[in-house]
Image (spheres, rainbow, N blue to C red):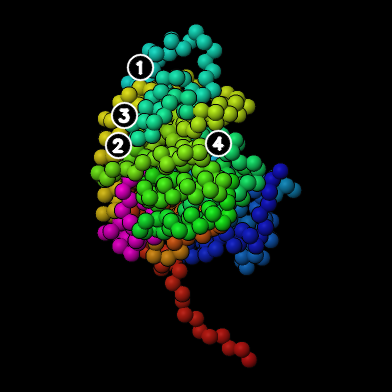
Amino acid sequence: MTSQVRGAQLARLLGQWHALPGRRRSPDYAALAAAVRGLLADGRLPLGVRLPAERELAEALRISRTTVTAAYGQLRETGHLASRRGAGSWTRLPGTHRVASTGLWTPLDDRDMIDLGVAALAAPPQLVPAARAATEDLPRYLGGAGYHPTGIIELREAVARSYTARGLPTSAEQIMVTNGTQHALDLVLRLALAPGGNVLVESPTYPNALAALSARRARIATHGLAADGAGWDADLLLGTIRQTRPKLAYLIPEFQNPTGHLMPTALRERLVAAAHAAGTDLVVDESFVDLPLEDTEPPPPVAAFDRHSRVISIGGMSKPYWGGLRIGWVRAAAPQVQRLAAARVGVDMASPVLDQLVAVHLLAEAPAIVAARRAQLAGQRDALLAALAERLPDWRVTPPRGGVTLWAELDGPISSALARAAEEVGVRLAPGPRFGLDGTLERFLRLPFTLPAADLVEAVGRLAAVRYDLDRAGRPRWREPSVIA
Ligand SMILES: Cc1ncc(COP(=O)(O)O)c(C=O)c1O
């Protein structure tokens, strides 16, 4: 069933569409069409929804119907709108553009675009040799059916060893291989959360985790992270867990996405104790644990404080290695792993053997690959910070000590408007509201430093230019007072 957006709703989403940069260079209909494209681009307006009839939108925006007709016409031409006589017009994206349910762009589209919407690195040079070596290993598995719901033993052992090396003794039975961390989260939610269950998440948090929770119809409460300083407010976080007793809390303690915060050891310990007392399961997303960018010793894993199988850790290859591998994992108690594997059989049966073998080869070279990644990321982070300090000095940024993103506090509630304007100059952004639940976080912007330094510097230059335009477009103009007689 196609859902419909009413005129007043779309008008609210469009906000200050007429004040976008370029407004004075382009006619109203083009500015309106650009604003709708911007909403589609940042996921505020979903795909496949029916737009209001032209007359209804014209009334809601207090503009002429001809302007809306022309804007819809342009959106049809650019492939952002499909129409059928009598059935109305609904949103879509041009052939090469695809978005996931949360509006994440896939990298298929516009190659000239500097994509700061995705926080992931290109593959390391070791990937092709690892893939070749994996094909050499494959014959060892070809005699069997190839279904390994918990993963191939070599990979489970390699992952278990990496936990043990971090001070958390782990056996292969405690590991289940998944198709990425996102898949791990989805499976864990299927097992640990009844539809409509209460969940606590950080705000801001990883948008696709929110999507997975919404798919479970979870009732989501948030713990607000400070943009600067320690991030988590220990008393508030533990107090919320004690009072609201959520069924589950989803947290990213290592170089949190998007803020980059690292949870201190003492809070980890108290968190596990509070969760146990409240009957809350902790799902700990360790996607960025391998990527500290300073020489600080990372705190022990949250699960190291767990005596009651309250903590389920999830992680994967995407951030230190490559997202295209689609390999992740769950670390939990062995019986939980068995239950997850049973649940998985009704979903996707098992992960591809060949890809798991590639992961085994990459993990065998972990120290060299990860060291190079960290050096690369530290350099790119510093280039981004320097460019921001020079070109956008009013933005406040706490340099992250790890991970791949920084969370900039902007000089106004302009994140979505900036993302729309940036799209026009070839920079794709994930604006702040994407990382929260309720359309707030407009004063924030996540900036990943996963692209080469030159691209980051170029992107900041373009952002600085459109930031300036936003101001000029929005500057109030004095009018003659009208006479009321
Ligand atoms: C916190 C967090 N969890 C999960 C994922 C998804 O990872 P994967 O590609 O392993 O599914 C990401 C990717 O950005 C992430 O940042």
Q: Amino acid at mark 1?
A: Ala
Question: Which element carries disc 4, helix, strand or loop?
Answer: helix
Q: Position of residue 194 (x, y in %)?
A: 64, 41
On screen, 410 above or below 217? below
Q: Amino acid at mark 4?
A: Val
The residues colored magenta run: 388-409
Which of labels 4 and 1 is toward the front? 4
In this rendered view, identify the residue nearer to me: 64 or 172: 172
- In the picture, residue 342 is in which quadrant? top right
Can you see residue 89? Answer: no
Q: Name the residue carrying label 3.
A: 366
Gap between marks 3 and 1 measured at Cα: 15 Å
Question: Which element carries disc 3, helix, strand or loop?
Answer: helix
Q: Amino acid at mark 2?
A: Arg
Structural crowding at the residue carrying mark 2, measured as other residues with C-alpha within 10 Å and reported as few (<14), some (14–19) or many (≥20): many
Gap between marks 2 and 3 measured at Cα: 10 Å
Q: Name the residue carrying label 2.
A: 373
Which of labels 2 and 3 is toward the front? 3
Gap between marks 1 and 2 measured at Cα: 21 Å
Q: Is residue 205 magenta?
A: no
